[in-house]
Image (cartoon, helix red, strand yellow):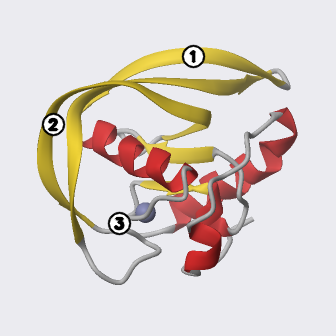
Amino acid sequence: MIKEIVKDEAILSQACEKATADDASVAQDLVETLVSLEDAAGLAANQIGETKAVVAYLDDDDNPHVMYNPVLKQGLAPFKAVEACLSREEEKKVTRFARIQVAYQELVDGELVERKRKFEGWTAQVIQHLIDHCKGKLI
Ligand SMILES: [Zn+2]
C-alpha cells in the first residue's frame, strides 16, 4: 500500500526497532511507496510511520531492493555532499563515504538471511542516508 511520507520529527528521531521476518508487509509498503514517488532513491520504514529498521532503495536500473537491519561495517573515501530528504524541507551538508560495506538481512522464503555487500557511488550515499534514518538521525 502506498503510504504518506512522515515529516514528524518525534517519529523520525526515534531509533528504529530491529526488524523481523514479520515485517514483510512493512517492506512491501515501503517498496510500493518508494516506486510511486518521483525523484526518490530510497526510503526508510520510519518515513512511512513504521519504526522498524527496514529500508528500500533503487539501484542504477531503478529496481527496488529491501534491506532488513542494515549496518555500516566499513566506509572509505569520505567526501562532503549536499543531500535532500523526503521528510525535510531543506537540503543539508553531510559527510559520506564513497565506498561502503554493509551487513544486512534479506527475506528469503519467509526467513531473514544474513548478507554482506559492497556499494559505491550514488547507491552507497543513499544507503548511508537510510541507515542514518534507522538510527533516528536526520540530515
Ligand atoms: Zn531522508
Residue, disc 2: 78
Quadrant of residue 67 within the rendered picture: top right
> In the image, what residue type sits under mark 2?
Pro
x 31%, y 26%: residue = 100
Which image quadrant: the C terminus?
bottom left
Location of residue 44 in the rendering, given as x and y in whole percent from the top left corner: 56, 55
> Taking the image as drawn, is residue 60 in sight?
no
Q: Kindly report the distance in space between the C-alpha atoms of the residues bearing marks 3 and 2.
A: 24 Å
Q: Kindly report the distance in space between the C-alpha atoms of the residues bearing marks 2 and 1.
A: 24 Å
Quadrant of residue 18 within the rendered picture: top right
Location of residue 56 in the rendering, given as x and y in whole percent from the top left corner: 54, 46
Q: Nearer the viewer, mark 1 or mark 3?
A: 1
Badge 1 marks a residue whose secondary structure is strand
User: From what the image shows, is residue 106 above or below residue 25?
Assistant: above
Q: Nearer the viewer, mark 3 or mark 2?
A: 2
Quadrant of residue 109 within the rendered picture: top right
Q: Nearer the viewer, mark 2 or mark 1?
A: 2
x 54%, y 58%: residue = 136
Query: Does the Cβ of the disc 3 residue fall within 8 Å of ligand 1?
Result: no
Residue, disc 3: 39
Residue, disc 1: 115
Badge 3 marks a residue whose secondary structure is loop
